[in-house]
Amino acid sequence: MYDKFNRKINYLRISVTDRCNLRCTYCMPEEGIQLLQHADIISLENIAEVVKVSVGLGIDKIRITGGEPLVRKGIIDLVKMIAVIPGVKDFGLSTNGILLKEYAHELKKAGLHRVNVSLDTLDPERYRKITRLGDVRKVLEGISEAKKVGLTPVKINCVIKQSSSEPDAVEVAEYCKKNNLQIRYIHQMELSNGQFSVVEGGEGGDCKICNRLRLTANGYIKPCLFNNLEYNIREFGIEGAILKALKHKPKCGSVNTNGTFYNIGG
Ligand code: SAM
Ligand code: SF4
């Protein structure tokens, strides 16, 4: 499907939960967040239905994200449901990697193609500071397990403050080179201030070539991460919400004051 600026829209990013087992300083407050009500979270079957309908409209690339997708109950079942939908050509999942060692084999078996893992530093103390809760060794074990079971190419998302020559980012880049991983640098953003930027080494944030729609854990289709627009699948139906998002997808994002990374999925 094409939007009114003739961009081909073929990529759906799905946030399956707003919950997370970490509290990264740039993403969530220390005390956590006001969680979505259980009744507002759409079911796994509903998510799979959204994928089916969107594939029928021209989506062929799917990414599961969150919050932390591996804390959503039934995540393996969801992966299974999506993997068998004909027309899904590229099927990835973004994770902080904490539970990846445990889940990698099952995810692969369920039909997931590949994973992106967030890693901002290799230093255990700084990792703990940034994530407030995490043990970087678990992430590294998760990454090697993902490679071992073939969830490849494994890509690393590294959040940077100013530039990719910051010491932590340089260390992560060296680790990636050594371990045959692709790195993408994400500038730390503040969506509510209208502050966003392109992902170095990736395609995100470049409005001219944006091919994305998003589904939130509470059932809204969003045409743009950097914009407040959203269409409820319960109100408009799945196809109706997707087509509204397509029709109103802005030429370029500006500011998002009613959502952020953990509930839209980055
Ligand atoms: N929990 C998973 C993870 O951390 O990979 C998936 C969801 S997370 C919201 C997706 C991506 O958004 C991560 O790579 C994370 O680093 C990034 N992110 C979160 N807050 C951000 C911010 N304020 N600016 C830039 N990137 C951010
Ligand atoms: Fe959780 Fe990912 Fe946000 Fe960190 S960036 S708090 S891991 S959702």
Image (cartoon, helix red, strand yellow):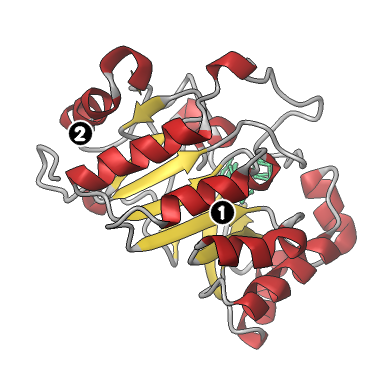
Q: In which quarter of the image is the N terminus?
A: top left
Name the residue carrying label 1.
Answer: 94
Residue 164: quarter of image: bottom right
Q: What element carries label 1?
A: strand
Q: What residue is rendered at 75% in x and 64% in y?
A: 101
Q: What residue is rendered at 63% in x and 41% in y?
A: 74
Measured from the top left, where is residue 3 in percent x and y?
Answer: 14, 40
Q: Which of 236 and 52 is in front in this view?
A: 52
Q: What residue type is labelled 1?
A: Ser
Residue 147: quarter of image: bottom right
Rounded to the nearest angstrom, the CA distance separating label 1 from label 2 is 24 Å
Regarding residue 156, the answer to whether it shows in the image is no
Q: Which amino acid does label 2 sit on?
A: Leu
Name the residue carrying label 2.
Answer: 246
Other-residue count near label 1 (Cα within 10 Å), few / some / many at <14 / 14–19 / ≥20: many
Asked whether mark 2 lies closer than 8 Å to ligand 1, one says no
In-image side of 70 versus 41 (left or right)? right
Asked whether mark 1 lies closer than 8 Å to ligand 1, one says yes
Measured from the top left, where is residue 17 in percent x and y?
Answer: 60, 33
